[in-house]
Image (tube, rainbow, N blue to C red):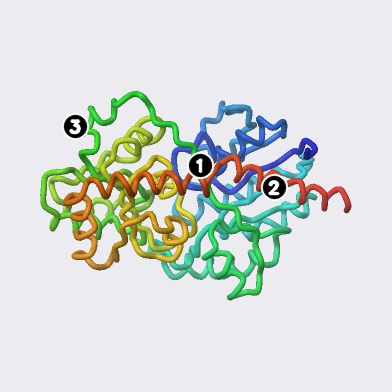
């Protein structure tokens, strides 16, 4: 049994989770680690987590300010978080986001052994301009040097760092904890019937292909809605164009979390996943866990996550995307069968308990290096 540890989780927007994958990761592992008896602190941004919220489900929250903006939000908050760690006596820390590699030396200077979670290959994301891509390219190299341990969430990302930089990493995926709610309030609010809609969930950014999926849906027959759940900061023009050009059957309810999100996952006819950059995508793993038939963009990291449980399409080919939708419409039994297979794979491969156990072991190993020093 591992000794009780003081652990800091930094680099995300914070918890309670209502944004993306990093925030979900922080909440799921921090709550479980706290339940094991560890003292866990999650660093949160003041525009995301209320100032007066000091604890959440047994986890301590350190809410710090930042400068809002596409390029300053993350680095300013991560800098302040790293400085805040001085004198706190943390045994180990997890910093997320490769762009935060610059601040890992501060944590180590504070005497905190640190793992850096690098997620996907951020420099390939279309949302970043030349400066952003340059920063991420430099951060990617720095990430191989400054942390005690590098963490990847997919074999594709592990292999990229090993092949490109000769840097090994600990492979720890995401998880899913299916909890279908008994309510159907969000379905009633949106005018949806169980098994009577397609569901897309992702941030509305170019590399996630919401515009291509919405455009291809014009070619799909029938009257079933395509519910596109999501939003994105600093992408107002892209989202406005997406909404303006979409077929009338496409619904845009915005970002939905909690029971509403779980309702949509529990009752969709099929889930559509269009990402082409990144590691293991939490929304895809969650859709698997809830037993959805999966329509998935054919990218290596998605193949790794889904295995043989998906209907594949090429996101840049409208006809191919439309054909994936039509396969489900023409054969509902296929959708049901593939959903069962997806749920079985998620239960076998993607468990938050197993993920948390991996992180607990990692933190114990980091703390041991601190104690030896």
The residue under label 2 is 93
Q: Which x, y percent locates residue 270?
A: 28, 46
Q: Is residue 134 above or below residue 283?
A: below
Relative vertical location of residue 64 with respect to residue 330 in this rendering, above or below: above
Are the residues flagged by discs 1 and 2 in contact, CB closer than 8 Å?
no
Which quadrant is the N terminus positioned in? top right
Could you tell which of marks 1 and 2 lies nearer the N-terminus?
A: 1
Say which residue label 3 marks. 191
Work out which residue is located at the far left of the displayed protein and give it: 222
- Residue assigned mark 1: 24
Indicate which disc, 3 or 1, sits on the residue closer to the N terminus. 1
Closer to the camera: disc 1 or disc 2? 1
Badge 2 local density, few (<14 within 10 Å), some, or many (20+)? Answer: many
Q: Secondary structure at mark 2?
A: strand
Residue 306 percent location from the top left of the image:
42, 55
Q: Residue 111 in the image: state x and y as whole percent.
A: 80, 50
Question: Spatial distance from mark 3 to mark 1, Cα to Cα?
Answer: 28 Å
Residue drawn at (29%, 66%), measured in percent from left and top? 314
Is 124 positioned to the left or the right of 64 in the image? left
Mark pair 3, 2: CA separation: 45 Å
Is disc 1 placed on a helix, strand or loop? helix
Q: Residue at x 25, y 60 (%)?
A: 212
Single out the mark in the foreground, 3 or 2: 3
Q: Give residue 249's mark.
A: none
Q: Position of residue 290 (x, y in %)?
A: 39, 40
The residue closer to the viewer here, 135 or 205, is 205
Note whether 285 is above or below 323 in the view shown.
above
Query: Is disc 1 surrounded by few (<14), some (14 to 19) or many (20+) residues within 10 Å?
Result: many
């Amino acid at each position: 049994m591992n000794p009780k540890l003081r652990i800091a989780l930094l680099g995300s927007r914070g918890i309670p989770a209502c944004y993306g994958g990093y925030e979900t990761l922080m909440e799921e592992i921090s709550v479980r680690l706290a339940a094991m008896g560890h003292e866990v602190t999650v660093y949160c941004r003041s525009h995301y987590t209320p100032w007066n919220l000091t604890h959440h489900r047994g986890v301590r929250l350190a809410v710090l300010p930042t400068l809002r903006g596409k390029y300053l939000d993350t680095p300013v908050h991560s800098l302040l978080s790293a400085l805040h760690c001085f004198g706190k006596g943390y045994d180990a820390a997890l910093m997320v986001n490769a762009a935060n590699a610059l601040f890992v030396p501060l944590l180590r200077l504070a005497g905190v052994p640190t793992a850096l979670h690098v997620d996907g290959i951020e420099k390939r994301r279309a949302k970043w301009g030349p400066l952003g891509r340059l920063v991420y390219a430099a951060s990617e190299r720095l990430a191989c040097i400054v942390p005690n341990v590098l963490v990847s969430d997919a074999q594709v990302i592990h292999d990229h760092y090993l092949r490109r930089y000769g840097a090994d990493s600990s492979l720890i995926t995401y998880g899913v904890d299916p909890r279908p709610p008994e309510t159907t309030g969000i379905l009633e609010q949106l005018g949806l019937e169980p098994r009577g809609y397609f569901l897309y969930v992702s941030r509305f950014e170019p590399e996630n292909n919401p515009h291509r999926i919405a455009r291809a849906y014009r070619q799909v027959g029938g009257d079933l809605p395509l519910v596109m759940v999501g939003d994105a900061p600093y992408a107002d023009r892209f989202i406005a164009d997406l909404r303006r050009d979409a077929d009338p059957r496409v619904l845009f309810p915005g970002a939905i979390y909690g029971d509403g999100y779980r309702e949509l996952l529990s009752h969709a006819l099929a889930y559509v996943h269009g990402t082409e950059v990144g590691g293991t995508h939490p929304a895809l793993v969650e859709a698997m866990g809830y037993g959805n038939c999966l329509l998935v963009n054919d990218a290596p990291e998605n193949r790794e996550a889904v295995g043989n449980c998906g209907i594949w399409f090429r996101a840049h080919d409208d006809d191919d995307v439309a054909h994936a939708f039509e396969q489900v419409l023409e054969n509902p039994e296929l959708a049901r069968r593939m959903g069962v297979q997806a749920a079985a794979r998620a239960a076998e491969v993607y468990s938050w308990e197993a993920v948390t156990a991996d992180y607990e072991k990692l933190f114990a190993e980091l703390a041991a290096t601190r104690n030896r020093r």
